[in-house]
Amino acid sequence: MDKIRYKMKLAYDGTAFSGFQIQPNKRTVQGEIEKALSKMAKGDFIRIKGAGRTDAGVHARGQMIHFDYPKYIPAEGMLRAMNTLGPEDIVFLNSEIVDQTFHSQYLATGKIYQYRVDNHQLKDPFTRLYAHHHPFEMDLKRTQKALAVLEGTHDFTSFASAHSDKEDKTRTIYEASVMIDEKTEEWIFTFRGNGFLYNMIRIIMGTILQIADGRRPLEDIKRILEAKDRTAAGPTASPKGLCMMEVLYDEHTLDE
């Protein structure tokens, strides 16, 4: 019998993981999922493919994976089994049987990420693993103006890690916005684009926070983009504030 391809959406708390991608002798999201699948398949090894590779400490509410399973199990049954066998810090949200042409990474047309910033003077012990603490006064309008410069199609070399393996660093950002949550007073940054380079959002955030609190002039953001030089930008912000919210496929329109 032909193998059955499953598409699954999942959420995870990235705190205790060394990232999504499998690494020897380290706990990873991919490693834990493949371990659960091997249990189900009675020892058969099953490789999964993720839509994106999140770093150590980065969270996800809408990561997407696919894999080929040796026998038919109803989609709901696969969902129940994976939530039973998987660890507590990974939750599978839905499951779907798809044809062999589906690929979670190659068919993705874009992604949505959020970055949360705790702007209180004192750290909140309950959000410390899910928000970057920045206890300096920040200017909302100034921050919004800086983010607006990043929207559109640009060469993001200045905002890519030196370890990025992508030669073409041109990406399109359809939305770079910020709002302040009325209840928590956290600053929630949203980035929606056709793709993001390694550490790109975290380097953008390290730079934006320096503009927001006045350590850098607003004009710097344009200068940094044009420099095409990683050393021109700010530091890489901590991974814990970052969350992959959604992976977009053809059924979504990016610039709606």
Image (cartoon, rainbow, N blue to C red):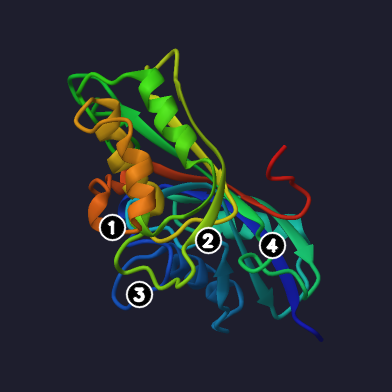
| Mark 4 element type | strand
Whether tag 4 and tag 3 are in contact, CB under 8 A, the answer is no
Question: Which one is closest to the eye, mark 1 or mark 2?
Answer: 1
Q: Residue at x 69, y 41 (%)?
A: 255
| Residue located beneath label 3 in the image | 23
Q: Which numbered marker is on residue 7?
A: 4
Number of disc labels: 4
Read off the residue under disc 2: 85
- Callout 3 secondary element: loop
Left or right of 137, for residue 86 = right
Give coordinates of residue 161: x percent, y percent. Answer: 32, 61
Q: Residue at x 27, y 45 (%)?
A: 238
Question: Are the residues at dot 1 and dot 2 in contact (C-beta closer than 8 Å)?
Answer: no
In the displayed structure, does residue 119 sit left or right of residue 155?
Answer: left
Query: Relative to 89, is 131 above or below?
Result: above
Frontmost of labels 2 and 3 is 3
Q: State which tag comes first along the sequence, 4 or 3.
A: 4
Q: Earlier along the polypeptide chain: callout 1 or callout 2? A: 2
Quickly name the residue at label 1.
230
